[in-house]
Amino acid sequence: MTGMMKKHALMLMVTMLAAVTMLAACSQSKEVDSGTSASPAVQGSSTTAASTKSATPEKRSKITMSLYDRGNTPPEEGTVTNNRWTKWINEQGPADVEFVAIPRFESKQKFNTLLASGAAPDVINEYETAYRDQLYSQKQLLPLDDLIEEHAPNYSKMLEAYPVLRQIGTKPDGKMYEIGRVIQSSAQVAVYIRTDWLQKLSLQIPQTPDELLAVAKAFTEQDPDDNGKKDTYGFSLAFLGDEAIDAMYGNTMFAQDGKLVEDDERMKAAIVFKKRLFDEGVIDRDYLTDKNGEKAKKDFLSGKLGIYVADSANVDFLTTLRSANEEAAIAPMLMPKTEFGQYTIRMLNPLQMTTVVYAGAKDPVAAVKTIDFMIAEPTWKMLKFGTEDVHWKNDELGCPRAINPDLRKVEMSYNTDLYMVATTIDSNDICNIPVVNKEIPNAEEWSQIRKQTRDLYENPAVPLYTLTHQEHMPTLPADLLKINTDWIQQSKDLIAKSVVSGGDYSVDQAMSDLTNLREKIGQTKTLDWYAQWYEQNKETAFLTQDIYQFLAEK
């Protein structure tokens, strides 16, 4: 390995790692109230309305709790912090909760403002690992070991059932600060190919990089849609398409003989293949302007693109494609195997930390009791499914199935962040098995496609190409984070320049310039930090192999 790319591939992993999520589950919430939300006693939780509202009620504590504001609360429901569900929580929970609205995609700025003014919420719900790590390093968080043991029976049971939750929630000082959930992990990013085009052109799903290029070329040049025009193309390098090529070559740091290593040959191979795709004319030549991949998605769904790297595809994905071409057929495919192995791209995080308690919380006991109430199965079922006979009814298996979709859209669609800390796995195992709604167009076919996708993408023999899920990566110190951010953008620019410049800017020249850039901005310090972190934490960190082991045991 050369000095230049021994270090380079590490940062691309940080750029490309990314991870949000849902799990089919069931409910037995009771009591109806004239078509609006009911206020049933929450049973099965140690912190219930029954226990908090005794014959001689104690004075209720007051806490504050953050709640993402996605701007999707219907006006007739109130506001994100004052609606039927926040009222229900205050009626049923162990404390009076004042919810604090946090703009979903400006959460760090809002939290920082609240912290600076001394108004941080007692309970902070935040998905971003790096920001929670920052709060820990600033000593803004409260250790929770004793509080959970004494006041959180529901989460204590979770820790017994899933000990790795404690491992992941524990910080370098050996204390547990974070509360998390178990979710149904599955392929987040998967590649789909037009199998009707393959059949028309007498081709097979590609198994090697050369076959991938050949199929993409045929999709571009041989009129697979039979409209007599040259208006289709084979692959897109926009957004996730670019990452898919890096995944194909395992272009990131990896563990070898107990150490983190990087192979500059992987980096070079990935750039060379991207350049071949561009030079052969089988991709959208304006892909660099498609920053979020929306044009590529539109092209695939309108029948102009043959191979597409999709994020969290669902039945609507197939239905939209069929609206443009009733005969369209698709199947999942893995990125081809290379001399470096075969890998998948991204998956949902099966163990996700979501919640911390502010060090300045006035009543930490009430804060932890409230979190534990939110975790309780009757609580999350009420929030997820709503009221029986209003939002759902039991099916023949005793599992809730949604009814009144128009009503649910108004009354249920905005409240998912209220139970973001909960593990929504039903105690009735059969209710955790997804049921196909045959009334939804293409649902049965999509169910089969989804099964094929999971069979391909959840196979430990074809693992994630990254060291671990992004949410389990350590957070760089502030100075190195700045260096790394600069490196990410400038290195991506040099690689893109090589891809689109033909013979005017070769891959070898790009790699030489990347070496110089790395030295110029001090990226070596960042890379050394990651290597040292791995050396010190490889026995306790939750890495890719641990993800597959956890899924197998679960």
Image (tube, rainbow, N blue to C red):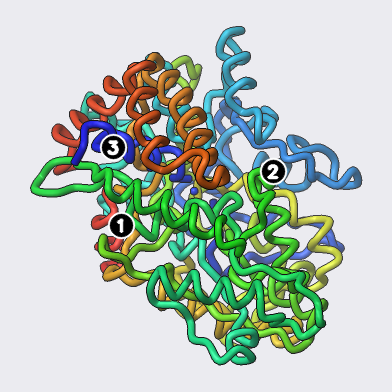
Q: Residue at x 56, y 13 (%)?
A: 115
Q: Residue at x 29, y 58 (%)?
A: 161
**Residue 156 in sight from this viewpoint:** no
Residue 21: numbered disc: none
- Label 1 vs label 3, nearer the camera: 3
Mark positioned earlier in the residue sequence (2 or 3): 3
The kind of residue tagged 3 is Met
The kind of residue tagged 2 is Thr
Left or right of 147, for residue 68: right
Residue 481: where, in percent of width, then height?
A: 41, 22
Pointer 3 residue: 5
Determine whether the residue tagged by mark 1 lies in a helix, strand or loop.
helix
Quarter of the image for the N terminus: give it: top left
Front residue of 275/492: it is 275
Query: Label 1, label 3: how many angstroms apart (C-alpha)?
Result: 28 Å
Determine whether the residue tagged by mark 3 lies in a helix, strand or loop.
helix
Q: Is residue 412 above or below residue 79?
A: below
Left or right of 260, for residue 38: right
Quarter of the image for the C terminus: give it: bottom left
Count the marks: 3
Q: Is residue 59 above or below residue 342?
A: above
Query: Label 2, label 1: how many angstroms apart (C-alpha)?
Result: 35 Å
The kind of residue tagged 1 is Ile
Left or right of 49, for residue 480: left
Pointer 2 residue: 289
Pointer 1 residue: 547
